[in-house]
Amino acid sequence: MQAKFARKTPFLPCYTPVISVMKSFNLCLLGFGNVNHTLVELLRLKSTELRERHGIGWRVTGVASRRLGWWANPDGFDVDGLVIARSSSAFAELRGQECSRHTDWLRAARADVLFEATSLNLETGQPAIDHIRAALEHGAHAITANKGPIVHAYRELCDFATERGKQFLFESTVMDGIPIFSLFRNTLPAIEVKSFQGILNSTTNVMLTGMEQGLSFDDSLRYAQRLGVAETDASHDIEGWDAAVKVSALVNVVMGVCLRPQDVQRLGISQLTGEEVRAARAAGRPYKLVCRAQRTGTGVEASVRPEQLPLTDPMALVSGTSSIIRFETDIFPGLTITEESPGLYATAYGMLADFIRAAGS
């Protein structure tokens, strides 16, 4: 008897569409420190993928910072020269045109996308808010790594972006490039976030880890500064302000409740000594700077403070520059995201991912 075999369908690889229409974007970089420098390197690294898979071409036509001034080249700066440029004279050699203010700069650079990565103004969010508003008014998408605009003008800027038919995106503001905001905006529609808790500040986490390993408070701070995690003036981290701003941003966006950083109950780690931190670790209840937010009948209660956590809590196991957040929602009782030892590429990736989203809108 002759055996009969079913005819099998041959394996077919996933279909990759051929991009027939290429869209090219003029990119403007506001703030030219580590984040936007790394973004340029990442854009170069991913250039072929952007072009072949997403139909995106790009050139950098504007660079600005407090130190450099406002420089534009509508034909596009030489990228190799851009990466090593560190002075205004270098931008002049790259055929840059110097502008006197940000509105002239956006116009001269013919901006399609603004990448805003300036320093945080905790009290007002300015001048970043005005720069983002000007970019949207000019007709450019606005992408930021600055938490100030989210905590001080989130709804206003979102509404204005919608009116102008542009995108206002900010994935890099919390947990680097981990897709927290886009997770709820795009992937989990109609979800209600009831609460969240997490460890969101790298400086204090590095310092607590260092103190557990035998360093004093001051030595652990210097270690964090050598790593490039902590600023020369690390008071915003140590006193819990950076974490409070991140809590405020998350509450504003994923919980839909307006909460200012000043409304977050806040206590930093400055009162902790190395001896206390080591004793807590030896007792199996290490200190962590914990961020919490919880819906109430009248709004949201939020806090940032050092807490001793049992080793059965996943937050107790997060060390160094790693971070973690756990959401409680009406559908998922627990949804946890952990980021291990991120670097600058992680922050820059958040801006790159936002660029791809904006380009496809």
Image (spheres, helix red, strand yellow):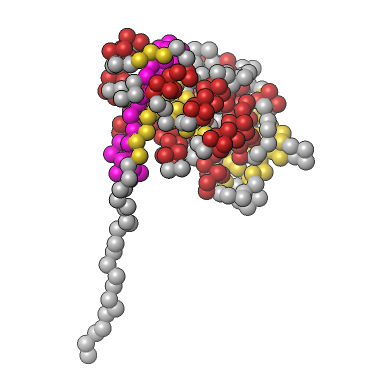
| Residue 263 image offset from top left, x and y in percent | 70, 26
User: Does the magenta run of residues contain 214?
Assistant: no
Determine if residue 147 is in view.
Answer: yes
**Residue at left 32%, top 9%?**
89
Residue closer to the observer: 112 or 172 = 112
**Total residue callouts:** 0
Is 52 magenta? The answer is yes
Q: Position of residue 210 (x, y in %)?
A: 50, 22
- The image shows residue 345, relative to residue 187, as above or below, that is above
Magenta span? 46-72
Q: What residue is drawn where x is 41% and y is 27%?
A: 111
| Viewer can see residue 36 | no
Q: Residue furthest top?
A: 89
Q: Residue at x 51, y 30 (%)?
A: 136
Residue 59: image location, x then y, percent: 33, 29
In this view of the protein, which residue sits in the foreground, 121 or 231? 121
Residue at 61%, 22% in the rendered image: 241
Q: Quadrant of residue 6?
A: bottom left
Q: Is residue 271 above or below residue 352?
A: above
Q: Residue furthest bottom?
A: 1
- Picture quarter with the N terminus: bottom left
Foreground residue, 189 or 272? 189
In front of the other: 356 or 33: 356
Tell me where residue 40 sits by quadrant: top left
Q: Going by the picture, which residue comes out furthest to the left? A: 2
Q: Position of residue 350 (x, y in %)?
A: 45, 34
